Each structure stands twice: as C-alpha cells, then as structure tokens.
Amino acid sequence: MGEYRSSDDDYDYDYDYDYYDDDDEVDFVDDDENAAELEAAVEPEIPPNSCPSSKVITKESLLAAQMEDLIRVMDLLSLKEHHARTLLIHYRWDVEKVLAVLVEYGKERLFAKAGLTIVETDDVSSSQVSSSYCCNICFDDVSLEEITTMDCGHYFCNSCWTEHFIVKINEGQSRRITCMEHKCNAICDESKIRCLVRARDSDLADKFDRFMLESYIEDNKRVKWCPSVPHCGNAIRIEVDELREVECACGLQFCFRCSYEAHSPCSCYMWDLWSKKCQDESETVNYIAVHTKHCPKCQKLVEKNGGCNLVSCICGQPFCWLCGAATGSDHTWTSIAGHSCGRYKEDREKETESAKRSLERYIHYYSRYEAHRDSSKLESKMKETMEDNIKILEECSTASSKDFVWLFNGVDRLFRSRRVLAYSYPFAYYMFDGDLFADEMTKGEREMKQNLFEDQQQQFEANIEKLSSFLDEKFHLYNEDEIKDLKLRVIALSATTDNLCRNLYECIETDLLGSLKHSVHEIAPYNTNGIEKASLPRGIRGILSLSHQNNLGGSNWDSTIDLNLPQASGDQGS
C-alpha cells in the first residue's frame, strides 16, 4: 500500500511528556535509573518520525486515498487510470500483490488474470470506407459517430453499449463490466461507460461513480467501514496485519478483523460465541431446566414457590417436584400419599446437575464481566471530577493542570486495564470450559493452566482496584507533601499495572493459545499506549489536487460526490 507522508504533528496523541518540571523536584526521584523506569511506564515510547499504522478515510478523502494507490500502479506500469483501477479491483486493491504477480509471472499474465486487454487499435472511423456501420448486436445501420470502440478492439453502436452498461450496473456488476463480444472478457473503459450512461440517465451514472469509488473499501482487505451505529461515514485503512484493534475518528474502538467492538484478549471466535450467548436465550433455557418442571398433564412449565415437594399446576394436576410424576393431593410434611420416588434416577439427575453447573459457571463469569464494564462506566466521570478539583487548586495555589499530567495518565492506564480485565472473563469462560478445547488439553493440564491464568488475573485485578482507589482520593484537599506522595504511588502503581497487563497477554498468547495444536486462536497484540487512534494525514488533499490537475485517465469524478455509506455497498462486482 502507499505510504502517507506526514509529520508527527499530524496525529493527536493524548500524552504529555512533561511529568516533571524544573521546579518540581520530587523526593522519590533520587535515582535516575528508577525515575526513568517510572516515567517509561506512563510515557509512551513513540519513535521519531513514526506514524500510526491505521488511518481514517472520510467521504472527502476517499477519492484521494484511492488515487494514491492508482498513481503508484500507473507510474510503475505506465498505465492509464482506468487500466490501473481494473488491476487493483481484481487484486483487491493490494498493490504489493500486484507487484508480486508482476515479478513472478510477468506483465502479460498479470493483465490476463485481471481481464485487462491493452491493444493498439485504429479507430473504426479510419478503418471503414463507408460512412455507416452495421452493429453486430442490433443489426442497425448507424453512423460512425454513434460507434464506440473498447480497448480490446471491439466496437458496437452506442445504444447497445448503453443498454449493456445499464443492465450490468443495475445487476450490481458495475466494477467489472466486460465487453459484449462473445467470449471476450476484457474490462470496458470506465470513462466511456460513464459518458454513455450519463447521456441516458445521470442518476445511474452517479450510482456507477459511487460504486466505483466504494470499491476501494468494499474490495480492499486493508480497508473497512467503521461499524458505528448510526454510521459515521468513515472507513479505516491499516498498513500492517489486519489482526489489530483501532479507534475511528468518531471514537468507536473495534476489532479490524471481525468488526466487532474491541475485545482482546478474547479471540474473534470466542467473542462471537460470547456475544451471541449473551444475546440469545441459552441461559434462560438453563434456568428453566434447573428451576422449573413440566406438568405431567398439560405440559406447561411450573415454577416451585414454596418448600413442599407436592406442587400443583394451574390446570389442577398435583405432581411430585422431585420426580415430576402425577400424584394425588393427599400428603404430609414428609411424604405424598401413595407415592414414593426415593429411588435414584441417574440420567435425570445428571442432566439437571449439568444444567445447574453450566448456569452457575456462566453467571460467575458474566457477573464479573458486567461488573468491570459497569466500573469502567462509572470511572469515566473521574476525569471531569479531576479537572474540577484541579481548578480548585489553581484558585488557591500556583499549581496548574500541567502539574497533574501524571494523574490523567493514571486514569488512562486505569481505563485501558479495566477494559482488558473485563474481556479476560469471557476468554477464561471458553478457554477452560472443557468443550471448545476438549481435544487440546487433558483435565489435569486444563486445571494447571487455569490456575496459572487465574493467579495472574487476580493479581492484575487487585492492582486495578488499588489504582482506582488512589485516583479517587480527594487530592485537592491535600498539602504539597501529600500530593507528592500520591504522585509517587500513582506512577509506581501505573507502571506495575502495565507490566501485569503485559504479562497476562504473554500468558494468553504463549502458554494458553500458543500451545494449541488443532485450532488457531489469535488475539490483537498488547499495546501499552492503548488502542491506536486512526489518523488522517494532512497531505491527503494534495494528492486529490494533483490527480485533478493531471486529469489522469480523463476522469471526471467529483471529490464531493454524494456517497450513501455504507448502504450503497450492494454492488458486489464479479
């Protein structure tokens, strides 16, 4: 893919590196090495001249982003714009794949695979003596001005071409419309398609333009729509492996591979199972199996609301709660008249106990998952409270918000860690349930790995709760020494929490998922700075301006074209 050229100023990192001022000599930073370690724990290590590996593509920048890849292929192979687009659509806008096929198979096979035909043909008007021509489709005699020739050398009347294009566009094949000639798979020139269709139906021509433009997202494995609802109109382009989590300019964080919400350390498959389990009625069924019985007469479900094991359905039928058999209504506190069910029925008891254990296990993990999500929502107000308290300190002292950057960095660390902790519970639910990985681990191995994971998870959780309590302290009531002490504790605990989070990821990636032999589960890599914010480079409009100045391929596309995103993505190509 093309490389965007931009400076570090183009991207907005929510970090401030001024943890200590010249006038702010803190007592606990006597040792330079320890100080560097503490600062490194909360200060992101951003290499010089580095840029984010994910970028936002807005409606306005979509054409420019597309033109960047087109220009690379056009310059490399000396092609016109519509020829380069035909290549890139076939190879899913993967410039590296185009280069690889070119090197391995040569230009001729590269073009043939994509249905691209480039031949030197004389215009039909110069090759015909007569002033008219009989179209081989409709067999009408038309003037030479009403004939259009495609790159493959085949020519037909404009009316037949137009009808062909309209049918293909309406069928959702506008991205790769082939020639009408029998057994000719050459892709038609999009500028000629646009010109002929616009003369008949301008709305349909706009639809064709929109589909061609959206192909950069729909057919591109490195670009995806932001899954926000309602849709923000943005797409995200990544420059590296698709297994990563990104944040759109609208603020939504999502997994680029599966388009679900960001869910690491769960794998995409685990999160798909978990989200469906939380949405459907699977656990309702388990609850019904444990807490209700079918009436032996009308088969309606009956829930027991008292201590006596003789229950009565609304239809009037009494039955035994223990075995479900119909009985009479005579009973004492200890027995039911004429009925005994003391004999052990192994299968039925096993089914009930299994359903009960499954329900209890799900409730255990779900309640903790929800508890940490709720805590995160409550802690989201912490920054606002801090800003208000800092204003109070500014009014009564010389302190400024810059002196409390460490506090906001601590809150950021808390948010990131709390999110990881919440999603670690759905991971553990499937990792150690004995069904998903039944053929991967013995019972002993599963218990050993579960203990290893839970030890790290509990230690991680304890530090998060401790960090939350530190950040919740009423520091605006503290004196200078107490604030310095809080600063030490927050920075040190933030560093520890970051290390524990990294260790938890390593445990999952190496000891748990990495040891699987028969299945592959991957998670997004750990990033100490949190989920990367996709950014829009500053120079993107320059590319757009350049493409129009050079009039590449004679394209008449308007960068302000009205895109119905992503609803207009029904065109599937061929």
Image: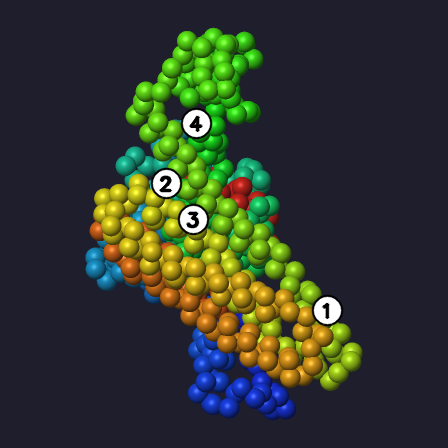
Q: Are marks 4 and 2 in contact (CB under 8 Å)?
A: no
Identify the secondary structure beneath mark 4.
helix
Quarter of the image that includes the N terminus: bottom left
Q: Do the residues labelled 3 and 2 touch (CB within 8 Å)?
A: no
Q: Do the residues labelled 1 and 3 touch (CB within 8 Å)?
A: no
Q: Which residue position holds label 3? A: 426
Q: Which mark's residue is nearer the viewer, 4 or 2? A: 4
Mark 4 and mark 3: span between their CA atoms?
23 Å
Q: Which of 495 and 316 is in front in this view?
A: 316
Of the residues under marks 4 and 2, which one precedes in the sequence?
4
Mark 2 and mark 1: span between their CA atoms?
58 Å
Of the residues under marks 4 and 1, which one precedes in the sequence?
4
Q: Which residue position holds label 1? A: 388
What is the three-letter code of the residue carrying label 2? Ser
Mark 4 and mark 1: span between their CA atoms?
52 Å
**Where on the picture, by quarter, is residue 167?**
top left
Report the disc number at residue 574. 2
Q: Residue at x 29, y 59 (%)?
A: 511
Q: Which residue position holds label 4? A: 289
- Residue 318 pos. (x, y %): 50, 12
Of the residues under marks 2 and 1, which one precedes in the sequence?
1
